[in-house]
């Protein structure tokens, strides 16, 4: 059930943070309050209101919800009523009818709270009021307002705008008490004859009673149906179901993204008391030596890093933009992308599952740094661990998600200097060991949650090798010919090739270039090509892609970026935009996009058997 989302909410900035004192948490934002207005949800307030473009402080959203009678407990139902917020950037205080239902920190991932009792007390109709703020802090993930000012505004070293607001849908879900709490679907093996083994672990919200329960799960694709069942013994809460699927079972891959409907039913005393349905793919993905294997066949990634960013909606869910971006990726012949630099909306993953785009799912840990106080480092580690748990539990059943990226460009001193942040003297290398401990902890947690996907982090060229060693696949972001060797693509790419060869010799595992590219201001041309022109961007992409020709371990190329995107204001970001997109922010192709299509589309067509 949707709660006025998508829709218009009462909205008001609250720079003095006096909303609770004024009673807005109980009565909602009054229409006549100074600054009160309506705001679109989902959406970023920074794109909707000129006076709030750079404002990151507290704002209130409120709306009245009226439940149908059948959804209230007074109807005799003992169900749970969950308020689910898809993404609030960065932190939210959620009030139902004036009572604080929950506080949540961390954007880009859903959180939910059982509001059944609060709603019961309030009756059928009540106010949901949410105080959202995106204040930058060294203790948040990603960090901002570090002691030293970054050379950009707002004060964050990130290269993407810190949009704020209710960025995804707000829903109420009604669930039976003690029903199906969680389902984890995994393809464990694809045998040489094409048969497959898959499992589902089903967890109940409460232990089964003295008579036990039965879980029945059907896996369907077209006319094919495979039904399995498992008994949940008294006092137990879990069931394991295993399918032996015959040869010829359609597998998920970018060239043939077959999805199966998984329908799970919980029966107590022979009566169905709950059911849950989701789309899954039968597929395996693993590292073998220096190769990636999808369904036990070598797989190479062609694609992009991309943001959630569009004019007017900012980082808010924008379904037409999500569909368009997937279409544009396919138009170039791409088969994959990375959700830089945070988890993207579930709807985007629905599109990727259905269209066959393999996804590297990234946490919000962009530019983790290890040069400030241990308290701040610990706070970021705790926040990142929450995000890793949230991300894996949200996306673990996605066929499209092939790998988890636990961080982007953890900061090394050389990098921080380029952001104008003061760094310890060179002899103080304690940041390396602190980073190593930090990643050891985070990677161990991720491995305990999901063994079916390789782990990585998207490294900066100067990231310490002790951090990178935690990765099953080396992902590395490189800008030779742009930030280093500017104007000299040939020299830059030659140096990069030599450096990558050394790194491969040390690490001996698959490598993916998760970022490379050049800013091109749309419409700027130059012959011979020079920086900021479309020709320079095109030539740079071509030279990087050529690096793969004699390096079989270089198994992926993700161009930075699919589209131009909004950044903080900085001297190197004309118009507050990063121009490394091969499409503009309004999704028009530059020369680079046409080049990629010429190079990649024939590969995609050959893989799909279309030529
Ligand atoms: C990077 C960052 C990305 C930036 C990009 C750039 O290495 O990971 O967030 O946008 O460089 O364009 O500078």
Image (spheres, rainbow, N blue to C red):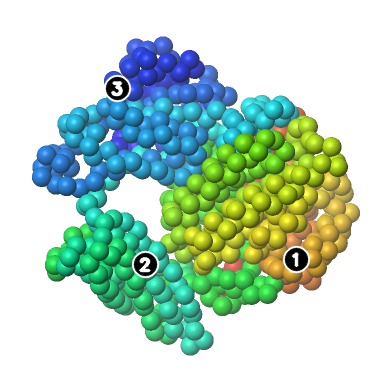
Mark 3 surroundings within 10 Å by alpha-carbon count, few (fewer than 14), some (14 through 19), many (20 or more): many
The first of marks 1 and 2 along the sequence is: 2
Instruction: Tell me where residue 82 sits by quadrant.
Output: top left
* Location of residue 21 with respect to 102 vertically, above or below: above
Residue 580 pos. (x, y %): 69, 44
Crowdedness near tag 1: few (<14), some (14–19) or many (≥20) residues, C-alpha within 10 Å = some
Residue under the image location 42 percent in, 16 percent down: 18
Q: Considering the image in quadrants, where does the C terminus appear?
A: bottom right
Q: Quadrant of the N terminus?
A: top left
Q: Kindly state the secondary structure of the residue where label 1 is placed.
A: helix
In front here: 394 or 178? 178
Nearer-N-terminus badge (1/3): 3
Which residue is the extreme one toward the bottom?
193
Q: Nearer the viewer, residue 396 or 114?
A: 114
Q: Residue at x 41, y 34 (%)?
A: 103
Residue 571 drawn at (x, y percent): 75, 29
Please tell me whether mark 2 sits on a helix, a strand or a loop: strand
Q: Which residue is mark 1?
A: 507
């Amino acid at each position: 059930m949707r709660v006025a989302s998508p829709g218009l909410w009462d909205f008001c900035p609250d720079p003095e943070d006096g909303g609770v004192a004024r009673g807005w948490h109980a009565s909602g934002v009054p229409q006549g309050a100074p600054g009160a207005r309506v705001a679109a949800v989902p959406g970023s307030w920074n794109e909707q209101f000129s006076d709030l473009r750079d404002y990151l402080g507290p704002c209130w959203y409120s709306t009245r919800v009226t439940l149908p009678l059948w959804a209230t407990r007074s109807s005799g139902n003992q169900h749970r009523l969950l308020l689910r917020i898809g993404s609030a950037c960065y932190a939210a205080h959620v009030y139902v009818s004036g009572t604080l239902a929950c506080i949540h920190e961390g954007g880009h991932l859903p959180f939910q709270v059982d509001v059944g009792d609060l709603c019961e007390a309030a009756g059928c109709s009540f106010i949901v009021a949410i105080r959202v703020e995106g204040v930058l802090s060294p203790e948040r993930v990603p960090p901002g307002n570090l002691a030293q000012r970054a050379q950009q505004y707002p004060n964050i070293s990130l290269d993407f705008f810190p949009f704020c607001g209710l960025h995804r849908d707000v829903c109420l879900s009604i669930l039976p008490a003690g029903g199906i709490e969680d389902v984890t679907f995994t393809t464990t093996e694809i045998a040489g004859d094409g048969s497959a083994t898959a499992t589902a672990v089903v967890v109940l919200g409460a232990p089964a009673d003295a008579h036990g329960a039965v879980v029945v799960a059907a896996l369907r694709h077209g006319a094919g149906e495979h039904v399995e069942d498992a008994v949940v013994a008294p006092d137990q809460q879990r069931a394991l179901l295993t399918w032996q699927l015959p040869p010829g079972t359609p597998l998920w891959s970018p060239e043939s993204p077959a999805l199966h409907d998984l329908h799970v039913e919980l029966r107590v005393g022979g009566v169905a008391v709950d059911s849950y349905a989701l789309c899954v793919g039968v597929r395996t993905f693993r590292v073998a030596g220096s190769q990636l294997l999808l369904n036990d066949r070598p797989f190479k990634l062609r694609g992009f890093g991309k943001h959630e960013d569009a004019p007017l909606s900012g980082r808010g869910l924008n379904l037409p933009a999500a569909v368009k971006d997937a279409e544009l990726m396919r138009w170039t012949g791409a088969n994959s992308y990375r959700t830089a630099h945070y988890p993207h909306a579930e709807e985007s993953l629905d599109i990727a599952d259905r269209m066959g785009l393999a996804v590297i799912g990234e946490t919000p840990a962009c530019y983790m740094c290890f040069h400030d106080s241990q308290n701040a480092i610990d706070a970021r580690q705790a926040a990142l661990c929450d995000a890793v748990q949230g991300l894996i539990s949200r996306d673990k059943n996605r066929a499209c998600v092939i790998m988890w990226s636990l961080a982007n460009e953890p900061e090394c001193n050389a990098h921080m200097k380029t952001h104008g942040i003061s760094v310890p003297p060179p002899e103080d290398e304690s940041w390396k060991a602190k980073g190593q401990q930090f990643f050891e902890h985070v990677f161990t947690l991720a491995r305990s949650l999901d063994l079916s996907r390789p782990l990585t982090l998207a490294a900066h060229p100067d990231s310490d090798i002790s951090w990178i060693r935690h990765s099953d696949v080396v992902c590395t972001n490189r800008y030779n010919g742009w930030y280093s060797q500017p104007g000299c693509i040939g020299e830059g790419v030659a140096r990069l090739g030599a450096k990558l060869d050394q790194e491969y010799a040390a690490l001996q595992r698959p490598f993916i270039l998760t970022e490379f590219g050049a800013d091109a201001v749309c419409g700027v041309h130059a012959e011979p090509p020079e920086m900021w022109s479309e020709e320079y961007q095109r030539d740079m992409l071509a030279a990087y892609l050529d690096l793969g020709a004699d390096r079989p371990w270089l198994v992926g190329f993700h161009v930075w970026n699919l589209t131009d995107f909004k950044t903080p204001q900085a001297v190197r970001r004309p118009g507050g935009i990063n121009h490394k997109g091969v499409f503009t922010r309004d999704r028009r192709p530059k020369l680079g996009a046409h080049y990629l299509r010429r190079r990649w589309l024939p590969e995609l067509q050959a893989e799909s058997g279309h030529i």
